[in-house]
Amino acid sequence: MQLRIENIGPIGSAVIDLTGLTVIGGLNDTGKSTIGKSIFAVVKAIRNKEQEYTSVQRSRVNAILSELTSELRNALGPKISPASLISATRSFTGNSTFDQETPEILEKSLGHLKAVILREIGRRIFRQNISRQIDTTDEVLADEDTSLTIIDHHIQRIRVLLTAKKDNKSIYANAFSNIMNSMFRGEINNKRAKSSPSYIEIWDNNAKIFGTHFQDNISKDFYIEEITISELFDDVTLLESPMVLTYEDAGTYYPDASSGHYYGDYPAYDLMQKLQFATKELEADNGLEREINEKISEIIKGKIYFDLDEGEFIFSSIDEIQVKITNTASGVKTLGIMQMLARAGVLTGTNLLIVDEPEVHLHPEWQIVYAEIIAILVKKYNIYCLISSHSPYFIQSIEAYSKLYNMQDLTKFYITNKDKNTSNSNIEDITSDPEPLYKLLADPMKRIAFLRAKAQDE
């Protein structure tokens, strides 16, 4: 599988092979994270297209119901309460799957929706129940006619929306666009190459199976070979910062009712959903889960779990001292996340794991441990991993473990370089000779040696 990117974010050009373990090294602000985010969005769009479709449909229905409420309010004045109508229609948006239900079920649901709205209006502005029409006045009849006209119009809009033929290609495209925009905050195109083509493509066995161009941050010319690409991965997990365990709103991800676009941190939201399965009672179930869990438990002297009663993560030491995750070291959080993913069954051979700069909160000794865990996942359990790093300790450890576990054929190394003229980043395959990457990462030590020598001269 090969990822090809042109003029996305800070990246000018990149061709990345996902062969098992893919390591991208380089300086800050050179596009390493962009690679991980892009492939995350592709896989999630494939795997979550139905959920994304349902969410978008729900947002569109909510927008129509919001317009319905506003028009009734304008037509009937203070006699009607917007809050009461929103409450009355909530059951429709909450119960529907928005996935092309049978005509009979849909009509029954729409009929119930209409009855609920009329009943709520009747309680407030009609002197008698509408269906019985007892002792009605001209004013009430006028209100009834107006209400029915408005309600029927908007229910027809909902009917048209929910009976429209599903277009899988459009569903994929919308899901991908929503995820990309939420992750890049609407800044997808390379700002230094506005006039140049921008695209993301996935190739397999020399055939394109996914592709889209971007113009003004909008996906265009969407292409997908659904059968082929659906066989690549069952899921993807992106690890960015262990602080996701600390901040309650870190995993927020929600749709805007009017636009259908999503806001929030999707990778953090996805990760939090998975980690909350790692409860205190959940034990490692298979060889992978036990091996990773025990290796990390030995290092951090305990385990992290999600407390269902408290609704937060807890670190439990080997002597059974319980500490809230806020008061736990960042390095423990980093390794603890991997430990929880193993216990929750997320680490499997059909899933892709993306880790962005795992070394940030780790002492060099623990970076070496993390590198060994990655090597074990790839070699022993056939898990695909994409890692970005700027740590010489971590990257050299990966290379060493790759040789130790005889997995050189599964490991690829890349370096990010900035073009001096355009400031765009290009990514170069250095698998045959990683020395340029080590030299780049060692340059700061030369700078320190120079400063020491200069200080002595002073």
Image (spheres, rainbow, N blue to C red):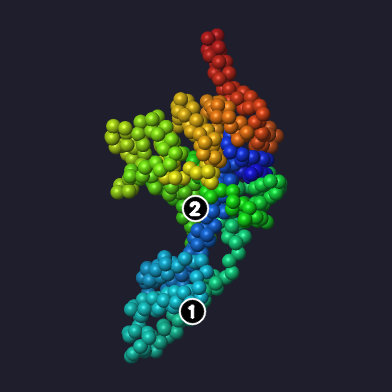
Q: Position of residue 68 (x, y in %)?
A: 46, 72
**Residue at screen point 37% across, 86% down:** 131
- CA gap, disc 2 and disc 1: 32 Å
Amino acid tagged 1: Asp
Q: Position of residue 21 (x, y in %)?
A: 57, 36
**Residue at screen point 41% across, 65% down:** 94
Q: Position of residue 370 (x, y in %)?
A: 48, 31
Which residue has dot 1 on it? 152
Residue 53 visible in rendering: yes
Which residue has dot 2 on it? 263
Asked whether the beta carbons under mark 2 and mark 1 sit within 8 Å of each other, the answer is no
Amino acid tagged 2: Tyr
* Left or right of 271, for residue 222: right
**Closest to the observer: 279 or 132?**
279
Q: Earlier in the sequence, mark 2 or mark 1?
A: 1
Task: From this view, report whether residue 437 is shown above or below residue 354.
Answer: above
Near mark 2 (Cα within 10 A), the count class, few <14, some 14-19 or many ≥20, is some
**Residue at screen point 56% across, 13% down:** 454
Q: Residue furthest bottom?
A: 135
* Left or right of 384, for residue 16: right
Near mark 1 (Cα within 10 A), the count class, few <14, some 14-19 or many ≥20, is some
Q: Position of residue 284 (x, y in %)?
A: 39, 41
